[in-house]
Amino acid sequence: MSAVDHIEALKAKHAMLEHAINEENARPHPDDEAICSLKKRKLQIKDEITRLISQKPH
């Protein structure tokens, strides 16, 4: 898997987590722990994307 493919896969995961967060927030009684966990994973993926982009040769 190339770096570009890996970044695109991470962006897709990031979008899926954003969707899951929005769905949880739309529930009548959102699970704050689940939201916190999803946000942490989303941030980790964002950090990984940023790291990979900064390492790419320009």
Image (cartoon, rainbow, N blue to C red):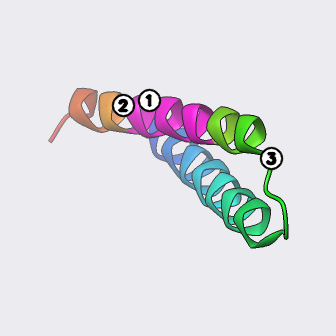
Q: Which circle marks residue 33 in the picture? A: none
Q: CA distance from mark 3 to mark 1?
A: 26 Å
Name the residue type under label 3: Asp
| Residue at image mark 2 | 52
Of marks 3 and 2, the one in the foreground: 3
* Residue range highlighted in magenta: 39-49
15 in the magenta segment: no
Give the quadrant of the C terminus.
top left
What residue sits right under mark 1 in the picture?
Answer: 48
Label whose residue precedes the other's in the sequence (3 or 2): 3
Going by the picture, which residue comes out furthest to the left? 58
Q: Secondary structure at mark 2?
A: helix
Q: Are marks 2 and 1 in contact (CB under 8 Å)?
A: yes
Where is residue 3 shown, x and y percent of the image?
46, 36
Q: Local crowd at mark 2 within 10 Å, few (<14), some, or many (≥20)?
A: some
Count residues near mark 1 (Cα–Cα under 10 Å), then give few for <14, some for 14-19, many for 20+. some
For the residues marked 2 and 1, what is the alpha-carbon distance in whole angstroms? 6 Å
Label 3 to label 2: alpha-carbon separation: 32 Å
Q: Give the residue drawn at x 83%, y 69%.
A: 27
**Total of numbered circles in the picture?**
3
Residue 7 is situated, as x and y percent measured from the top left of the image, at: 49, 44
Q: Amino acid at mark 1?
A: Glu
Residue at which label 3 appears: 31
Q: Quadrant of residue 37?
A: top right
Magenta: predominant secondary structure element? helix
- Direction from residue 35 to residue 46 in the image, left or right: left
Q: Quadrant of residue 36?
A: top right
Q: Quadrant of the N terminus?
A: top right
Does residue 1 appear anywhere in the picture? no
Dot placed on the residue nearer the N-terminal end, 3 or 1: 3
